[in-house]
Amino acid sequence: MNYCPQCQSNKIVKSGIVNHRQRYKCKSCNYYFTVNKLGKKIDQYYVTKALQLYLEGLTYREIERIIGVSHVSVMNWVKKYNIHKVENQDYHPTYKILGQSELSNFFSNQENTKGAGMIVTELGDKYMVIKWERFKD
């Protein structure tokens, strides 16, 4: 730890151990703190993709199956970034995961694109096509 998280001063000293973690004290502001938690950090790419999929109407568990990140993590990101999706009960989007050649075949068939709104987004080395009916009564 090179600086105080409270005042950003570099005047810090060791101040004991709490729960098997080193504790520090800032000499400038007298703030006590411990080292940051060691753990897995999820790439921001997956956070962005999860929030995009959430806004497109997919459920937390669907996002979990697609991206491979816990649905609880997705819920926490939605809360953290204060994301509100538009509540529209008239449709539920369908999605497909396609490779590049499958994607070109998908778009070459006019029936796949007729009368529907869709979005294509990159998902690692594949592509996701999210599709919903444009006009639904």
Image (tube, rainbow, N blue to C red):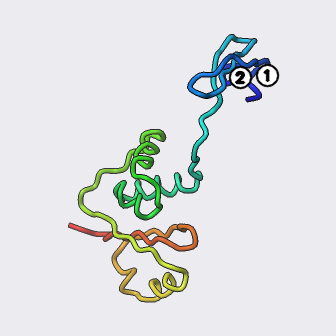
**Closer to us: 93 or 116:** 93
> Which residue in the rendered view is the most extreme toward the left?
137
Asked if residue 100 is positioned above or below residue 26 in the image, the reply reads below
Asked if residue 57 is positioned above or below residue 38 in the image, the reply reads below
Label 2: element kind: loop
In which quadrant is the C terminus drawn? Answer: bottom left
**Closer to us: 16 or 4:** 16
Tell me what residue is drawn at x 47 percent, y 39 percent: 80
Tell me: 52 left or right of 89.
right
Which badge, 1 or 2, is on the more N-terminal residue? 2
Query: Which mark, by number, is residue 10?
Result: 1
Question: Contact (CB < 8 A) between labels 1 and 2?
Answer: yes
Asked if residue 84 is positioned above or below residue 104 in the image, the reply reads above
Asked if residue 125 is positioned above or below residue 4 in the image, the reply reads below
Amino acid on which the number 2 mark rests in the picture: Cys
Pinpoint residue 10: horizontal percent, then vertical percent.
79, 22
In which quadrant is the N terminus drawn? Answer: top right
**Closer to us: 115 or 131:** 131
Quarter of the image where one finds residue 6: top right
Pinpoint residue 136: horizontal percent, then vertical percent.
24, 68
Give the crowd class for mark 1: few <14, some 14-19, many >=20 residues within 10 Å.
Answer: some
Query: Which mark, by number, is residue 39?
Result: none
In three-dimensional space, the C-alpha distance between marks 1 and 2, rounded to whole angstroms, equals 6 Å
Tell me what residue is drawn at x 79 percent, y 18 percent: 11
Tell me what residue is drawn at x 41 percent, y 59 percent: 63
Pinpoint residue 23: horizontal percent, then vertical percent.
65, 22
Amino acid on which the number 1 mark rests in the picture: Asn
> Which residue in the rendered view is the most extreme toward the right?
11
Give the crowd class for mark 2: few <14, some 14-19, many >=20 residues within 10 Å.
Answer: many
Residue, disc 2 = 4
**Closer to us: 135 or 60:** 60
